[in-house]
Image (cartoon, rainbow, N blue to C red):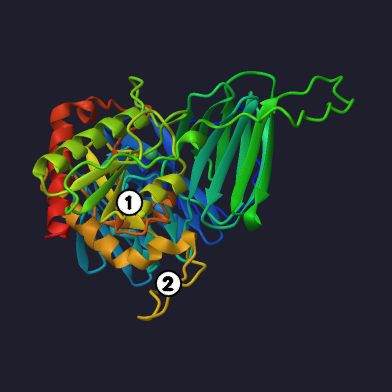
Amino acid sequence: MDVLEGKPLSLSFYRYGRPVLWLAAMLAAVLIFWPARTLRSDNFILYLPEGARTIPIQSVGRVDYLPLLQILNLFVHVDGMQASQSSLRVWFGQNDVQIQLGDKKVRVNKTRVTLQAPVRAENGEWLVPLDFMASALPQLTHQPVQYRVGARRIFIGSTKPGTFSVHLKALATGADITIAFTDKVSIKTEASNGRWIVYLGGHPVEPLESSFQFQNPFVKTIQFDDQDGVPKLIVAPASDGLDFFPTLAADGKVLEAQISKQQPATALTPLPPANPLVAPPVPPQAAEEQMPAVEGSASLPLVILDPGHGGPDTGSHDKNGVLEKDLVLSLAMQVRAALVGSGRFRVALTRSGDSDPTFDRRDEVANVLHASAFVTLHAGDFGSASPRAVVYTFEPPASVETASPAPAGLPQLISWERVQELHLDSSRELGTAIEQALGAFRGLSVPKLTAAPARVLRSVNAPAVAIEIGSFAPDTDATLFTSSSFQQQLAGAILNGLDNFKKP
Ligand SMILES: [Zn+2]
């Protein structure tokens, strides 16, 4: 995670409320426990209707913890506390929470909640693992939460996150970046330490991937960062002397930015008009008009496999330099082998080499070939060490009504942008079948199927899901995921899921 250095940050998008610190409790706890330990410190971000707050994360071993009293103090006024060497009880209003040192089970009001790791005490603070925020906090604050497993942020109450997708178009003299948000945002930009920072205001966002890496002579990475409670995109140019021109389009939902060589100071004289006889540079994928090859016998259901990213868009990477685009392509090849080898499916890939089809192109492949199912493959950061696979279906933007199929006999008139909305039920069936099949894969943790506004699923005219494996991030080692035994097991599980979804 990239953290800004030195520069004071703009807080204009969020109003910070009064900090409520319950000093007596903290002090008492400090006196009881004092074994100092060097802990990594990152922040956990809470998005509340009135603004974002941060709580320092304390990592003990491989588990991330948060101090319980700091969490509670953000929401309530604590009425009383009973602490011993090995247990803590805190109450407020009708609520009561009891935790026990070294115990995963905590008592929240009348119910018992089992956390993913035992309660600890470090540096004088009672610590609960991150999953407390999703499993216990809603019962104490009586407010719903939205939490993506493994994420270091949570959205509370009426705060519903949107998300965004990033696309890079390589040009001969620069690069065009398009960032499509699901909800309206506002931006404020500044240059700092040789990078461009785009502060995001308006609707809060939850990144599906927090780091985008490119092999491009103009732009190196785009990273989402909200570690200080201020969400922002940090754009790192690949060299000096470049200009960055961001604009908002589509009613605040699309950020378009051009990166180009700086004009020399003498360039006040207008540039000569472009020679109309010289063709402009053509992006590599413009020539790719043919449909990809389909393997398997024509009577079988067709599965479109979509390895994410490609070409200059490398996706994320691990600490050994394994690129997401390569990992998901080799995974797709294994899935293809399993599906074709079964004799029960036909298969086509949206890319089989290092190209970068647009989202629309990937969807077009599925629609033109009349896919029975569409599976996009990604690898991402779950902030957790244990191998995980998460299955998503498409979540339509909240602002519009869900499209419904036209009554029988009437022609289907639905815009390209809303095609997937016709298939949400069958996509969920497909997602559940794959989630259950992956769940049988030993050593892989598989959270429940969730919905996310994944742009690549938006226009697929068939049941469609995204599968993301991880944690895959610059501080993780992807050796397990690149091993062919892991990939074959995963491919086998995806085949089982597809078999259970579509019994022909
Ligand atoms: Zn990805």
Residue for point 23% across, 31% down: 481
The quarter of the rendered structure image containing the N terminus is top left
Residue for point 61% across, 46% down: 255
Residues packed near mark 1 inside 10 Å, few (<14), some (14 to 19) or many (20 plus): some
Residue 376: x %, y % from top left: 32, 45
Mark on residue 369? Answer: 1
Q: Quadrant of residue 270?
A: top right
Residue 315: x %, y % from top left: 41, 33
Residue 291, placed above or below residue 36: below
Residue 245 appears left or right of 384 = right
Residues packed near mark 2 inside 10 Å, few (<14), some (14 to 19) or many (20 plus): few
Can residue 78 be seen here? The reply is: no
Residue 293: x %, y % from top left: 29, 39
Who is closer to the viewer here, 503 or 390? 503
Q: Which residue is mark 2?
A: 412
Disc 1 element: loop
